[in-house]
Amino acid sequence: MKAEIKILRRKSAFSDNYWQGIPFETTDENATVAYALNQMNRTKGLTDTEGREVELPIRWECSCLQKKCGACAMVINGRPRLACDTELREFRKKRKGNSGDQMGEIRLEPLHKFPVVADLIVDRSILFENLRIMQTWVNGSGKVAEKRSDQAYEASRCLQCGCCLEICPNFYPGGEFFGAAAFVPAARLLSTLSVEEQREVREQYEAHVYAGCGKSLACRDVCPAGIDVDHLLSSSNGIAVWRQHG
Ligand code: SF4
Ligand code: SF4
Ligand code: FES
């Protein structure tokens, strides 16, 4: 397979960004964007589409490479996704006469709602700061009532990747609305804590989730963990706002 991978590069937070197209070729049918980035970073004397030497490494974050940690979130052809969960073959050109191994252009950009550190790395501190404000930690035993165990498990699958914040029309860093990356972990707590223990989280939930969510559910459509945001939202609204604890 052959592709042109276009990367929005930036040397540091203080430098200008620029697009750089890099030709990439592999025989691995299952190659992902993460694989391509790793391979390119291992290639000595890598050149771009204009024949210039590419400054390596191309900076990006990863840890698990198994869709479990959320570190590799970036914008891929306009959509927030995990690099380790995005196969190059998805971008095959569907054209008459195409031999089948030619990819369309694959554009990689850092998530836009966070400050860029370098290339595809962003600083997602605001996401964790919002969790701190929401007080999304377990103080008590963390025991989950049986009737809410499914909801608690679903919420615990959040990767804190930030893809939902990228697409959310109502979230901006420093704003009062914290988005799905905050309300999904809050939903886990609301399933775990007793009614008395929920008070603080309920107050934060009302102020930073309920008051600002437009319920468009764009976040559900991009969540790489496939979390049932719709269900968690309505159930948490019930517990936190309408006080339906049954
Ligand atoms: S439902 Fe819409 S407004 Fe609410 S968090 Fe998701 S994308 Fe944002
Ligand atoms: S809700 Fe989904 S998209 Fe948002 S941070 Fe959690 S895993 Fe990522
Ligand atoms: S590297 Fe962990 S989700 Fe991609």
Image (cartoon, rainbow, N blue to C red):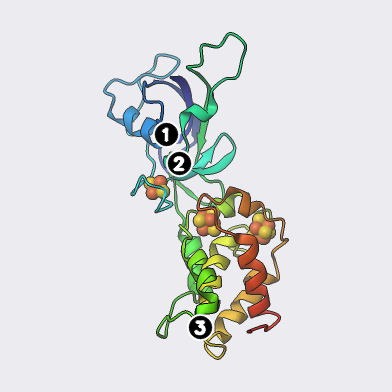
* Residue lying at the far top of the rendered structure: 97
Q: Residue at x 50, y 50 (%)?
A: 115
> Distance from label 3 to label 2 (Cα)?
34 Å
Query: Considering depth in this image, is 163 or 244 the residue closer to the camera?
Result: 244
Marks 2 and 3: in contact by CB < 8 Å? no
**Marks 1 & 2, CB-CB < 8 Å contact:** yes
Is the distance from the Cβ of mark 2 to the nearest ligand 3 atom less than 8 Å?
yes
Secondary structure of the residue carrying tag 1 is loop
Location of the N terminus (image quadrant): top left
Circle 2: residue type:
Asp
Which circle's residue, 3 or 1, is located before the other in the chain? Answer: 1
Give the structural element (helix, strand or loop) at label 2: helix
| 153 versus 200 height, above or below | above
Q: Position of residue 162 (x, y in %)?
A: 52, 54
Residue at left offset 67%, top offset 84%? 243
Q: Which mark identifies residue 193?
A: 3
Q: Which residue is mark 2?
A: 85
Q: Is residue 139 above or below residue 42?
A: below
Q: Amino acid at mark 1?
A: Thr
**Where does residue 234 sit, x and y in percent of width and height?**
67, 69
